[in-house]
Image (spheres, rainbow, N blue to C red):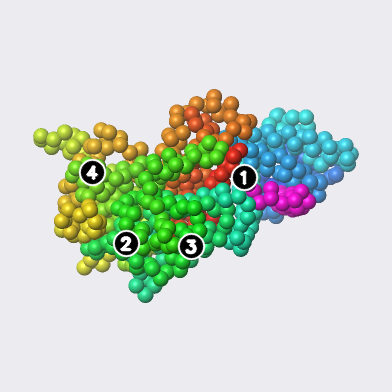
Amino acid sequence: MRYDHLKSWWKRARQGLFRFCIYGALLVAGEVAFYTITKVGRIIPQISFLFQYEWLVDPKLELGHIWDIEIHTLFGQASLYMFFVYATICVFGLEPAYRFMKKKDVPLILRGIVYMFIILGLECALGWVLVWLTGCQIWYYRGPGTIWVYTSWAIAPMWFICGLISENVINLIDSFDELKMNVYGIAQTGSGPKNQIVFISDVHIGPRGRDGADAGWFFGVYEVYLTILLHKISHDRRVRELVFVGDLFDDWLYPPETRPLSIRETIASWRDSLFMAPLRACIEKLDAVWYISGNHDMHVRQDDLEELAVGGKNMRLVDHLEFEKSHVLSCGTVLAVEHGHEADFFNATDRHPEAIRHLPLGYFVARIFAATESQTAGPGVTVDKLLRAAYSRVGTATLVDKGGESRKSRMGQLFIRFFIDALLAYVNGKLPDERHLNNRTRIYLPSVTGQDDGQDYVTVRQVKECYSWLLEDWLKTRSTSFFVATGKNGLEGYAREKFGPRDWKLWFSRLFSGKPDDLFVIMGHTHSSRLEYVMDRQRQGVYANTGAICKNDKQRGPSWVVVTDSPKRARVRVKKL
């Protein structure tokens, strides 16, 4: 529900008038610039086809000479009537169309075509209205493609582009409402039914930095972000449950020769931090606080969470399949919630008998990467960038058959060897000579009760040997959907598969249907928030990604997901501070 829907009709009308004025003022200024933009566009061969329309004004107004003025003077013109024309097109045409299509999973190209026809139709109609009112042609078109004098197919591509640009303006204006909702949510205790479930992922609370030093991905302002968010949740009476969708804690981001803390030790080290009080308040006040593990906390156990118990209640560790079985909303919508790492070749839990404590190769990649923490890695160095750098070097390697080995097996061994060597080379380039890593470098393993095998550490060489079969196994079984699914849109395809096979006929039949969604798929892992409406699959629903609370270079500020339960139709929103 948008904030303006909670207002009285009079306040909503005032807000509509405000938007009307904003659109009108912006686009009148845009029309003044339009003349110079058109002149420049016509002299650029690659895009000149977009600017071949003949846009003119009534000859008796003697304003047609504007097209003959030199480009560098930046002159343009507009009638004040255009304020009302543009504002009417935006408020009564583009806004409703965008909000409708946003919820119906309408592809971008089709959205642009709809906007184009809306603008063409209203432009033509309003042109005739202005002639009737003023007796003058405020604008008209001439030449091939002209439609009823006041619009033209020649300008249709421009309106296609402008319509898509308008989505960003509408989102910007709506963001002010979202800000009000967030501020009011923090300031008040909340009212109404207890029908909200909040999903948070990728906080990555790891080792605590000494003397305020950066440590891992969670430090400084991110601790404040988490504190504010948990305070808001604990004081909002509408919130029924809180779900951590993996990577709340982190035992991966430790330099190779440092023994990682257990999850229990990590929690204990943050005992006096700002966020602990509101976290315990959530556990105490809400109906339930759930914990679904991710890849960076895949060894978390219920016993580890005892540190957080309060008033006889505790956070509940649950498998994502168990959670799905117990969470069907009152309208029948099923909640399918998982971290998302099981779709990822590098980060999925490894069931192979040779895998070291079932840790994926991504664990050792992260440990090697962590050697650059607080060193000379420089700003913006991330695991994703390291992976891309390693891929580029692997891509230049020559894979040669060796006697007695299958090509796939040989390829797998070479891939792992070259990949880790490329990763070491990249990391060593960021480290002083005395800290360089090599095949003999020890990677100390975490202490996990019940899973320890007496092995305190492995060497980089052992990692190469233990995971040499990985590529061959993946090529044979395709046990995961992607090689690396941590890109901004990395889980979109995997999430959509959960809705079943694609069928465009279903999309058309659902376009004007008010039927409740069948499924909400909620994930984290990518550190990039996302909201996708799925209408063209066997099951209708929404894929939402929580984004992250920790430091990352994929989005600005923390984000989370809120599901609002309702007997008629549940809703999903991605929210940001």
Which comes sooner in the sequence, label 2 or label 1? 1
Task: Say above or below: 401 vs 233.
Answer: above
**Which mark's residue is nearer the viewer, 2 or 3?**
3
Q: CA distance from mark 1 to mark 3?
A: 39 Å
Rendered image: mark on residue 415: 4
Q: CA distance from mark 2 to mark 3?
A: 19 Å
Mark 4–mark 1 Cα distance, whole angstroms, equals 44 Å
Residue type, mark 3 in image: Ala
Does residue 54 appear anywhere in the picture? yes
Identify the mark at residue 281; answer none if there is no mark: 3
Task: Pick whichever of labels 1 and 3 is earlier in the sequence.
Answer: 1
Q: Nearer the viewer, residue 239 or 550?
A: 239
Quick one: 438 or 219, which is closer to the camera? 219
Residue type (three-letter) at the residue carrying disc 2: Arg
Task: Between residue 138 and residue 549, name the one nearer to us.
Answer: 549
The structure residue drawn at horizontal position 16% and vertical position 36%, both measured from the top left corner, is 401
Q: Which stretch did the figure color magenta?
A: 1-29
Residue 257: percent from left, percent from top: 22, 63
Q: Considering depth in this image, is 391 or 327 the residue closer to the camera?
A: 327
- Main SS of residues in magenta: helix
Q: Residue 167 got which mark?
A: 1
Quadrant position of residue 322: top left
User: In the current view of this chain or complex, which residue is farthest to the bottom?
Assistant: 211
Q: Are marks 2 and 3 in contact (CB under 8 Å)?
A: no
